[in-house]
Image (cartoon, rainbow, N blue to C red):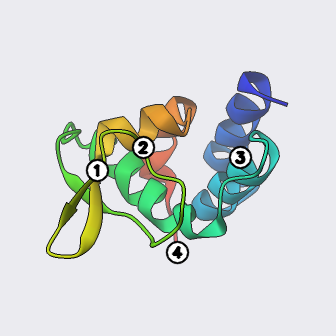
Amino acid sequence: MGRMTTEALADSIIEGEIKFERGIGLHLSSNFYPPLPVGYVKPLAEAIQAVWEDDGARLVALPDVPLLPRSAEKVEGVWHVDAESLVDACKAWPFVDSANYDED
């Protein structure tokens, strides 16, 4: 597992073999020990989309789970982190190129 798996998942999204959020979920559950909580899928998808749109400074709300990037800060009772930091913390850069393939 690791970088090669992440790149393969991103390629599978581009090829239409799996959905965008499914690929992210597989990445978070397979490439981390312990696996990152499933609650990170939607925030990470939002962060990846923001970075793809050249808006890496956009704040992304995080789920109320115990794992937070160091740069997270609480705003009005909700944890937030800039999109670029979340993509970096989750080692999700290969997904940035697949962000425009999100088809719900």
For badge 2, the amino acid type reads: Pro
Mark toward the start of the polypeptide (4 vs 3): 3
Task: Report the mark closest to the observer, 2 or 4.
Answer: 2
Residue annotated with mark 4: 104
Residue annotated with mark 2: 69
Crowding at dot 1, Cα within 10 Å, few <14 / some 14-19 / many 20+, comes out as many
Q: Are marks 2 and 4 in contact (CB under 8 Å)?
A: no
Residue annotated with mark 3: 27
- For the residues marked 4 and 3, what is the alpha-carbon distance in whole angstroms? 19 Å
Q: Tell which of 102 and 2 is nearer to you.
A: 2
For badge 4, the amino acid type reads: Asp
Numbered tag placed on residue 65 in the rendering: none
Q: Secondary structure at mark 4?
A: loop
Q: Tell which of 47 and 66 is nearer to you.
A: 66
Q: Are marks 2 and 1 in contact (CB under 8 Å)?
A: yes
Q: Secondary structure at mark 2?
A: loop
- Where is residue 3 shown, x and y percent of the image? 71, 24
